[in-house]
Image: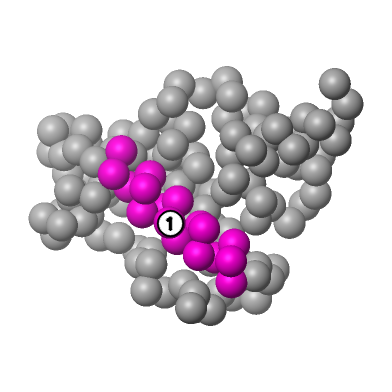
Amino acid sequence: MNESEDYIRALTRYPVLQAQPDGPDRVLELARHLDALPVEKRRGWLREHAIMSVAYHRTGIHSIDSDLLLMLDQEIAALERYVRPVDLPPGRERGGQREMLTEVEMHTPLEELIVQGRWDNTFTREDIPDIP
Protein backbone atom coordinates (compact mmCIF):
# COMPACT_ATOMS: atom_id res chain seq x y z
CA MET A 1 0.00 0.00 0.00
CA ASN A 2 1.42 3.42 -0.87
CA GLU A 3 1.16 6.72 0.98
CA SER A 4 -1.59 7.98 -1.34
CA GLU A 5 -3.77 4.97 -0.54
CA ASP A 6 -3.06 5.41 3.18
CA TYR A 7 -4.11 9.05 2.92
CA ILE A 8 -7.41 8.18 1.20
CA ARG A 9 -8.11 5.48 3.80
CA ALA A 10 -7.38 7.92 6.62
CA LEU A 11 -9.85 10.44 5.19
CA THR A 12 -12.43 7.68 4.76
CA ARG A 13 -12.05 6.59 8.41
CA TYR A 14 -11.93 10.15 9.74
CA PRO A 15 -13.77 12.57 7.38
CA VAL A 16 -13.16 15.42 9.85
CA LEU A 17 -9.48 15.34 8.81
CA GLN A 18 -10.48 16.73 5.40
CA ALA A 19 -10.29 20.14 7.09
CA GLN A 20 -6.63 19.61 8.01
CA PRO A 21 -4.71 22.36 6.17
CA ASP A 22 -1.22 20.93 6.73
CA GLY A 23 -1.36 18.27 4.04
CA PRO A 24 -1.23 14.48 3.72
CA ASP A 25 1.68 13.86 6.09
CA ARG A 26 -0.15 15.59 8.96
CA VAL A 27 -3.40 13.74 8.12
CA LEU A 28 -1.56 10.41 8.27
CA GLU A 29 0.09 11.38 11.56
CA LEU A 30 -3.28 12.34 13.07
CA ALA A 31 -4.93 9.17 11.76
CA ARG A 32 -2.22 7.01 13.39
CA HIS A 33 -2.72 8.91 16.65
CA LEU A 34 -6.51 8.41 16.47
CA ASP A 35 -6.16 4.73 15.57
CA ALA A 36 -4.20 4.15 18.78
CA LEU A 37 -6.88 5.68 21.04
CA PRO A 38 -9.86 3.92 22.63
CA VAL A 39 -13.04 4.76 20.73
CA GLU A 40 -14.33 7.10 23.45
CA LYS A 41 -11.16 9.22 23.44
CA ARG A 42 -11.05 9.10 19.63
CA ARG A 43 -14.52 10.65 19.46
CA GLY A 44 -13.44 13.39 21.86
CA TRP A 45 -10.39 14.23 19.76
CA LEU A 46 -12.44 14.19 16.53
CA ARG A 47 -14.96 16.61 18.02
CA GLU A 48 -12.13 18.89 19.14
CA HIS A 49 -10.53 18.77 15.71
CA ALA A 50 -13.83 19.63 14.00
CA ILE A 51 -14.45 22.55 16.36
CA MET A 52 -10.94 23.89 15.92
CA SER A 53 -11.19 23.61 12.13
CA VAL A 54 -14.35 25.69 12.17
CA ALA A 55 -12.78 28.19 14.58
CA TYR A 56 -9.74 28.57 12.30
CA HIS A 57 -12.09 29.21 9.39
CA ARG A 58 -14.11 31.77 11.37
CA THR A 59 -11.00 33.67 12.40
CA GLY A 60 -9.50 33.60 8.92
CA ILE A 61 -6.57 31.31 9.73
CA HIS A 62 -7.61 29.02 6.89
CA SER A 63 -10.59 28.75 4.60
CA ILE A 64 -13.05 25.86 4.36
CA ASP A 65 -15.70 25.50 1.68
CA SER A 66 -19.37 25.47 2.69
CA ASP A 67 -19.86 21.73 1.99
CA LEU A 68 -17.02 20.85 4.35
CA LEU A 69 -18.36 23.29 6.97
CA LEU A 70 -21.75 21.59 6.77
CA MET A 71 -20.13 18.16 7.14
CA LEU A 72 -18.17 19.39 10.19
CA ASP A 73 -21.38 20.74 11.72
CA GLN A 74 -23.06 17.38 11.25
CA GLU A 75 -20.06 15.52 12.67
CA ILE A 76 -19.98 17.74 15.76
CA ALA A 77 -23.70 17.14 16.36
CA ALA A 78 -23.28 13.38 15.89
CA LEU A 79 -20.25 13.20 18.17
CA GLU A 80 -21.97 15.17 20.93
CA ARG A 81 -24.48 12.33 21.25
CA TYR A 82 -21.66 10.10 22.52
CA VAL A 83 -18.77 12.27 23.71
CA ARG A 84 -18.67 12.85 27.44
CA PRO A 85 -16.59 15.49 29.23
CA VAL A 86 -14.27 12.75 30.49
CA ASP A 87 -13.56 11.81 26.83
CA LEU A 88 -12.37 15.27 25.81
CA PRO A 89 -8.68 15.94 25.34
CA PRO A 90 -7.05 17.93 28.11
CA GLY A 91 -7.51 21.61 27.48
CA ARG A 92 -9.85 24.55 27.43
CA GLU A 93 -13.21 22.77 27.54
CA ARG A 94 -12.49 19.83 29.79
CA GLY A 95 -10.36 21.77 32.25
CA GLY A 96 -12.90 24.51 32.86
CA GLN A 97 -15.82 22.15 33.25
CA ARG A 98 -14.18 19.53 35.47
CA GLU A 99 -14.61 21.71 38.56
CA MET A 100 -18.27 22.44 37.82
CA LEU A 101 -19.60 18.97 36.97
CA THR A 102 -20.35 15.99 39.18
CA GLU A 103 -18.67 12.65 38.54
CA VAL A 104 -21.93 11.41 36.99
CA GLU A 105 -22.09 14.45 34.69
CA MET A 106 -18.46 13.89 33.63
CA HIS A 107 -19.72 10.56 32.21
CA THR A 108 -22.89 12.00 30.60
CA PRO A 109 -22.96 12.72 26.85
CA LEU A 110 -22.47 16.38 25.97
CA GLU A 111 -25.78 16.51 24.11
CA GLU A 112 -27.65 15.73 27.35
CA LEU A 113 -25.60 18.22 29.35
CA ILE A 114 -26.23 20.96 26.76
CA VAL A 115 -29.99 20.34 26.88
CA GLN A 116 -29.89 20.43 30.70
CA GLY A 117 -27.92 23.68 30.64
CA ARG A 118 -25.03 21.99 32.46
CA TRP A 119 -22.47 22.31 29.67
CA ASP A 120 -21.11 25.74 28.87
CA ASN A 121 -20.77 25.08 25.19
CA THR A 122 -18.23 27.68 24.10
CA PHE A 123 -18.89 26.64 20.51
CA THR A 124 -22.33 26.57 19.00
CA ARG A 125 -23.26 25.37 15.56
CA GLU A 126 -24.99 28.69 14.94
CA ASP A 127 -21.52 30.25 14.96
CA ILE A 128 -20.52 28.45 11.79
CA PRO A 129 -20.63 30.90 8.88
CA ASP A 130 -21.38 29.98 5.28
CA ILE A 131 -23.70 27.06 5.96
CA PRO A 132 -26.58 27.27 3.52
The front one of 58 and 66 is 66
Taking the spot 59% from the left edge, 62% from the top edge, the residue there is 68
Q: Residue at x 60, y 34 (%)?
A: 13
Q: Is residue 20 left or right of residue 40?
A: right
Residue 2 is situated, as x and y percent measured from the top left of the image, at 88, 26
Q: Can you tell which quarter of the image residue 127 is in?
A: bottom left
Badge 1 marks a residue whose secondary structure is helix
Q: Which residues are magenta?
A: 66-82
For this view, does 94 lie left or right of residue 51? left
Given the image, on which type of amino acid does mark 1 rest? Gln
Q: Tell me residue 92's x, y (percent).
A: 42, 52
Q: Is residue 35 above or below residue 52?
A: above
Residue at 24% across, 50% down: 111
Instruction: Using residue 20 as the reference point, say whether residue 80 is left or right of it.
Output: left
In this figure, which residue is indicated by the disc labeled 1?
A: 74
Q: Nearer the viewer, residue 15 or 45?
A: 15
Q: Nearer the viewer, residue 52 or 91?
A: 52
User: Quarter of the image holding residue 77?
Assistant: bottom left
Where residue 29 appears, as percent x and y from the top left, is 72, 33
Does 73 appear in magenta? yes
Dot 1 crowding, Cα within 10 Å, few <14, some 14–19, many 20+: some
On the image, the x and y values in percent for residue 81 come to: 29, 44
Specify the farthest residue to the right: 2
Locate the N terminus by quadrant: top right
How many marks the image carries: the answer is: 1
Q: Is residue 13 magenta?
A: no
